[in-house]
């Protein structure tokens, strides 16, 4: 059973059928501007990488330091609309930073503990028969779920395409249904392994003990108090001007070539794709809002969560990964946040807190650099931001387009010149 300090569980799960209105997005006028020279250098860093990237659709970028805000957009959102700074995009797994923050705050508030298990917390959940199945280890703890060390498999690999299609087409979809798509047995917990199943289980716990749907909890805890805009799909309606995803259509059983995924066979899935990992990858927002979120979550001056919860969250980044999440190197992982080093123009690297996101023709980079107290969000409506950038500073073999953009911005703030070209030092 749960420890004695765990609050009595809520016995009903909030309904998942009511859809909230789509969030709306406007450019903020409440913040000062960066110095003109800095803005010019930011623009150079972003446009240099965008111009060299191929194939591509659109990029949108924001930089926030608590007082000053810079935004810029390039390319196109769809075949009929340019990308703008207020064009909403799906932030994919960067959504996990909201879930990790929510659960860390719930833990600080005594709703449950890190060492409570799935069984102890969800055994009286109405959907427990969908949770307590052969490939789900109900003895794993909240902490093991949050650090991706649960050992529970998922449905994310290329060979699981039809499992994902089944989720998207499920007429009676609810989050716990997804667990039936796990085809592999669980392994003993302890080693890092990225899994969608963790987000489903954590979302069910957060929702049950918060007593409301996840999107409502996010609106009340984060979006409303912080004055930022966003929402969790499919619990909010799809914003009509959301940027269309772009990818190699051959990956989705369509004609070969790079193109828009809102057309043809993919059109029927565009609004259902958020069901695949639900709370783990379904937030729709803009770079301005996500850069501000990163600052409010990680900065000593931020107010997204309590000081105690923030310390717990940052102190959790201890799990060695040495892996790549969505093409971005994250060397240490914690409660749905990670630590990554971003390349700078002098060949050094700057430490950041992050959680990248990508897949389904979308990319998200979020970097908060504690040494600068600055947050950067880079969103793209294609996977291009994960491809090789042109910066590749001083021998680094792989630097993604999104990291190159962020590195150029951080370099500017550190007084370094922005690198606009790179030559392979091994070339004759």
Image (cartoon, grey):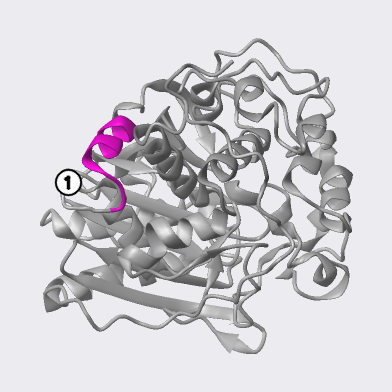
Q: Is residue 192 above or below residue 16?
A: above
Residue 155, image x and y in percent? 77, 37
Q: Is the N terminus in the top left, top right, bottom left or bottom right quadrant? A: top right
Query: Which residues make up the magenta segment?
Result: 304-314
Whether the magenta-drawn stretch holds residue 222 is answered as: no
What residue lies at 34% left-to-right and 68% top-to-bottom? 62
For the C terminus, the image quarter is top left
Q: Quadrant of residue 374?
A: bottom left
Judged from this view, the residue extending furthest toward the bottom is: 80
Q: Nearer the viewer, residue 424 or 29?
A: 29
The single residue placed furthest to the top in the displayed view is 188
Horizontally, residue 357 falls left or right of residue 169, namely left
Residue 33 vertical placement versus 160 (above, below): below
Tag 1 secondary structure: loop
Residue at (15, 73) in percent of width and height: 34
Q: Where is 262 relative to 283, above or below?
A: below
Q: Which residue is mark 1?
A: 300
Name the side, left or right, on which 66 lies relative to 108. left
Left or right: residue 4 versus residue 202 is: left
Question: Is most of the magenta stretch helix, strand or loop?
Answer: helix
Give above or below for 23 relative to 119. below
Q: Is residue 421 visible?
A: no
The picture places residue 352, in percent across and down from the top left corner, at 29, 42
Tell me the residue at 66%/60% (across/down): 361
Are there few (<14), some (14-19), or many (20+) residues within 10 Å of tag 1? few
- The residue drawn where x is 21% and y is 48% is 299
> Of 245 and 140, which appears nearest the observer?
140
């Amino acid at each position: 059973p749960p420890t004695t300090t765990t609050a009595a569980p809520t016995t009903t799960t909030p309904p998942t059928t009511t859809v909230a209105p789509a969030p709306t997005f406007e450019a903020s006028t409440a913040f000062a501007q960066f110095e003109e020279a800095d803005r010019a250098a930011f623009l150079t860093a972003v446009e240099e990488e965008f111009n060299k990237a191929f194939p591509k659709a659109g990029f949108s970028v924001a930089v926030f330091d608590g007082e000053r805000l810079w935004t810029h957009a390039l390319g196109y959102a769809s075949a009929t609309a340019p990308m703008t700074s207020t064009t909403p995009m799906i932030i994919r797994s960067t959504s996990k930073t909201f879930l990790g923050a929510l659960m860390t705050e719930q833990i600080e508030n005594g709703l449950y503990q890190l060492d409570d298990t799935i069984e102890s917390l969800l055994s009286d959940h109405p959907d427990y028969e969908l949770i307590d199945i052969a490939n789900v280890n109900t003895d794993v703890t909240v902490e093991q779920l949050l650090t991706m060390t649960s050992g529970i498999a998922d449905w994310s690999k290329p060979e699981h395409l039809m499992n994902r299609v089944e989720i998207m087409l499920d007429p009676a979809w609810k989050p716990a249904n997804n667990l039936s798509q796990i085809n592999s047995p669980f392994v003993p917990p302890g080693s890092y392994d990225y899994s969608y199943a963790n987000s489903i289980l954590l979302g069910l716990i957060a929702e049950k003990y918060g007593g409301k749907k996840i999107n409502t909890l996010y609106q009340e805890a984060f979006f409303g108090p912080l004055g930022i805009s966003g929402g969790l799909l499919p619990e909010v309606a799809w914003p009509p001007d959301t940027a269309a995803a772009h990818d190699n259509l051959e990956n989705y059983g369509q004609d070969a070539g790079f193109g828009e995924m809102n057309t043809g066979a993919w059109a029927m899935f565009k609004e259902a794709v958020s069901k695949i990992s639900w709370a783990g990858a379904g937030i729709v927002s803009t770079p301005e809002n996500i850069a501000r979120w990163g600052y409010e979550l990680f900065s000593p001056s931020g107010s997204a969560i309590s000081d105690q919860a923030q310390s717990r969250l940052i102190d959790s980044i201890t799990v060695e990964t040495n892996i790549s999440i969505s093409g971005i190197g994250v060397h240490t992982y914690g409660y749905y946040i990670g630590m990554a080093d971003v390349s700078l123009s002098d060949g050094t690297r700057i430490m950041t807190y992050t959680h990248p996101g990508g897949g389904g023709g979308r990319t998200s980079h979020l970097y908060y650099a504690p040494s600068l107290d600055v947050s950067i969000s880079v969103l793209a409506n294609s996977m291009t931001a994960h491809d090789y950038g042109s910066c590749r500073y001083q021998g680094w073999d792989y630097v993604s387009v999104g990291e190159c953009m962020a590195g150029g911005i951080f370099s500017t703030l550190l007084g370094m010149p922005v690198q606009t070209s790179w030559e392979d030092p091994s070339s004759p």
